[in-house]
Amino acid sequence: MSTETAKKPSVLFVCVHNAGRSQMAAAFLTTLSEGAIEVRSAGSQPADKVNPAAVEAMSELGIDMSAEIPKVLTTEAVKESDVVITMGCGDECPYFPGKRYEDWVLEDPAGQGVDAVRPIRDDIKTRIEGLIASLTPAAK
């Protein structure tokens, strides 16, 4: 194993409820980056629990989100992240110069069944694969 000479890049996913899109994105990034990227997720108005349809859709791909709990967005979480990806929280996300911000326009899975969540999940996975490629040096 090689020693880490540089700090791992860190990504914060933010949506309103931190119950669907941001949780799926965080779970994909955690799994697909295999620990190479620090992952956080939060919501501007966190829900009581993670969307059960999102949990089911992710479990179909072998990713268990059942223990996740929606977290409140804090200024500290934004400060500590290199990349902040918002998903429909608009102006409620604090802005700090020097951070990379992306806004991913994704349908909100709230209140929808697993059939409606699957295409959102697949879109997120594709975006996560691109994000990983942009944040990690290519293996030689």
Image: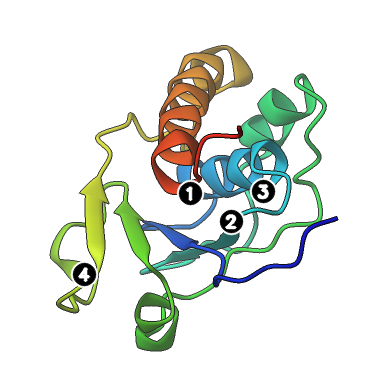
**Residue 37 circle label:** 2
Mark 3 sits on what residue?
Answer: 30
Q: What amino acid is found at the position of numbered circle 1 in the picture?
A: Ser
Q: What's the distance in space between the residues labelled 4 and 1, CA to CA?
A: 15 Å
* Mark closer to the observer (2, 1): 2
For residue 69, side relative to residue 76 (left or right): right
Give the residue at mark 1.
22
Horizontal side of 45 relative to 89 (left or right) equals: right
Residue drawn at point x = 52 percent, y = 26 percent? 125
Quadrant of the image occupied by residue 106: top left
Cβ–Cβ under 8 Å for marks 4 and 1: no
Q: CA distance from mark 3 to mark 4?
A: 25 Å
Mark earlier in primary sequence (2, 3): 3
Q: Nearer the viewer, residue 73 or 102?
A: 102
Please name whichever residue, 67 or 35, is drawn nearer the observer in this view of the structure. 35
Q: Secondary structure at mark 1?
A: helix
Of the two numbered discs 1 and 3 in the rendering, the one whose residue sits closer to the viewer: 3
Label 3 environment density (alpha carbons within 10 Å; few <14, some 14–19, many ≥20)? some
* Mark closer to the chain start, 3 or 4: 3
